[in-house]
Structures are given as C-alpha cells and as structure tokens.
Image (cartoon, rainbow, N blue to C red):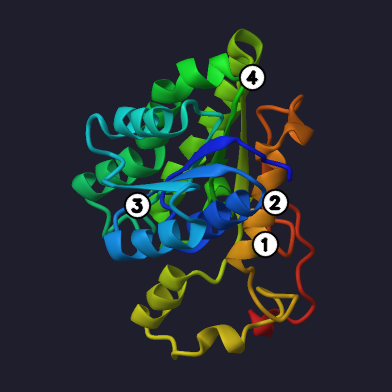
C-alpha cells in the first residue's frame, strides 16, 4: 500500500474529484479527513471508507478558523497529519460583465486564500512529519474559457502559490507542495453545470474529437490515481511542480485541419 498509515485531509471530498481522491487514498492505506458542504453525501463517503479510516467535517473552508479546525480534527482523531489535498473550490460561470467584486472576492477566498490558510495551519504538523500538499488546480489557470473568468483567475493564483511555496517550504521545512491541473472531468457538478447552460441530459455522450480525442472526457478516478503518486513517498524529492492532466496540450496545440468542427 503506497499510503499506508498516512493521515490526509482532502477538502471538498464529498463529491467529484475530491471524493475519488479520498476513496483511492483510503484504498492505498491512508486515514482520511473527509470535508465538504454536503453532509448527506459526506456521510456516505465516510461510511464507505469505514469508521476506523475516516472522519467527516462539514464547514465552508473559507470561514475563519475552518483550516485550524480541520487540522485539529486530524491530529485529535489520528494522532498526526501527513498530507493535505486542497481540492475544495467554487466552479461558476462568469465574464467581465457578470463578475461583480463580491463574486470575485468569494471565488478567490475559497479557491486561493483558503488553500493558503490550510497550508499555513497544517505547516507545523507537515514539517514534523516531512509531509506534503497537493493542490488541485485547473488547466483554466493558463487563461481560461471566456465564461470562466473569475474561476480562471483564482486557479492562476493557486498555481503561482504552488510554485512559490513548493520551492521555499521544501528547502526551509522539508514540506513538498505540488499541483495537478485537471482538464475536463465528468463530475456530478459538471454534468449539472452543462445542463444549466442548455445542453441535453446526455451531452457527455456526443463530444467533438477536438475537445475529447479519447471520445469522452476524463473520469474523477483518473485524477485520483495520479494524486496518489504526489502524496506517496515515491515523489519525496519533487516539489513546486504543476502537472496538467488533459487529453491534449494546453499550450502549443496543433490546430485542427477542419476548424468547422470547433
């Protein structure tokens, strides 16, 4: 087991990618602090993991003191903390016309400031245990879709933080910080988001090969499998790295011959 007896906080793990990461890490031998906003779903995840393997904490990660409470829950329950997965995020459509300052501040508060606060709260424990942090970003960090302005800004800032702290904290504290940038992933929330935008219920069954060369978009489990490497001792010398997980290159992609298919 690649994560045997490691204690890991996974934020936003009641659904989607976070849930898949929590389940995969537990399968690899880890103890998990499950976190999110949806208590019924969180209870299902915790029950699936088992009472001896998981604790559930329901709270908005951006509320003052929430990061400290998560760290305390981990140490009080399991005696230590080895890793943090910063996955919790708001994903919502907006452009410059629909993004007011309150919306932008909330987006950055949850997607960027809260991960920073959790790293800071966890740092003493992570330093003690030579632990690590895995931030879950997005390929939208590089510029983003036209309708994901605020979200893309928040993920761009998260990526810079990963590279900055991944360097300094590795040298000064022995704590590694890396990031995965998933591409288009078939989560419960993504299915609903696209339906709200007017797409049919089965929109994910008929996708352009330009956007989905594999004939489908990514599954949460595929992100979770990759996450295990960054949380395991196998990557113990690597820090400050950002890895894109998508079906095609985000930078320097060869343009399609038939642009009418876009």
CB under 8 Å between discs 1 and 2: yes
- Front of the two marks 4 and 1: 1
Among the two numbered marks 4 and 1 on one chain, the one whose residue lies closer to the N terminus: 4
Give residue 229's quadrant in the image: top right
Label 3 packing within 10 angstroms: few (<14), some (14-19), many (20+): many
Residue extending farthest to the top is 172
Whole-number angstrom distance, CA of label 2 to CA of label 4: 21 Å
Q: Is residue 40 left or right of residue 195?
A: left
Q: Is residue 48 above or below residue 142?
A: below
Q: Is residue 55 above or below residue 236?
A: below
Q: Which of the pair 17/128 is nearer the observer?
A: 128
Among the two numbered marks 3 and 1 on one chain, the one whose residue lies closer to the N terminus: 3
Q: Which residue is mark 4?
A: 167
Q: Residue placed at 29% from the left, 55% from the top?
A: 37
Q: Residue placed at 65% from the left, 28% from the top?
A: 240
Q: Which of the pair 225/6 is nearer the observer?
A: 6
Give residue 167's quadrant in the image: top right
Q: Which residue is mark 1?
A: 222
- Front of the two marks 3 and 4: 3
Q: Which residue is mark 3?
A: 36
Q: Which residue is mark 2?
A: 226
The image position of residue 82, as x and y in percent, is: 56, 29
Q: Is residue 41 above or below residue 85?
A: below
């Amino acid at each position: 087991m690649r994560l045997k007896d490691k204690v890991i906080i996974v934020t936003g793990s009641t659904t989607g990618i976070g849930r898949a990461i929590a389940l995969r890490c537990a399968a690899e031998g880890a103890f998990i602090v499950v976190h999110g906003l949806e208590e019924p779903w969180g209870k299902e995840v915790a029950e699936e993991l088992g009472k001896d393997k998981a604790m559930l904490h329901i709270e908005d990660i951006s509320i003052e003191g929430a990061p400290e409470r998560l760290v305390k829950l981990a140490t009080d329950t399991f005696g230590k903390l080895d890793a943090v997965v910063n996955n919790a995020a708001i994903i919502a459509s907006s452009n410059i016309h629909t993004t007011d300052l309150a919306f932008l501040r909330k987006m950055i508060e949850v997607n960027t400031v809260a991960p920073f606060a959790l790293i800071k709260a966890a740092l003493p424990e992570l330093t003690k245990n030579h632990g690590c942090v895995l931030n879950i970003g997005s390929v939208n960090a590089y510029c983003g879709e036209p309708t994901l302005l605020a979200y893309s800004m928040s993920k761009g800032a998260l990526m810079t933080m990963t590279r900055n702290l991944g360097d300094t904290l590795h040298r000064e504290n022995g704590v590694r910080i890396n990031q995965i940038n998933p591409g288009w992933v078939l989560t419960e929330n993504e299915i609903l988001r696209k339906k709200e935008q007017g797409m049919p219920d089965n929109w994910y069954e008929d996708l352009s090969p330009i956007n989905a060369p594999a004939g489908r978009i990514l599954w949460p489990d595929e992100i979770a499998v990759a996450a295990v490497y960054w949380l395991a001792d196998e990557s113990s010398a690597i820090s400050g790295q950002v890895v894109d997980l998508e079906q095609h290159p985000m930078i320097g992609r060869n343009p399609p011959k038939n642009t009418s298919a876009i």
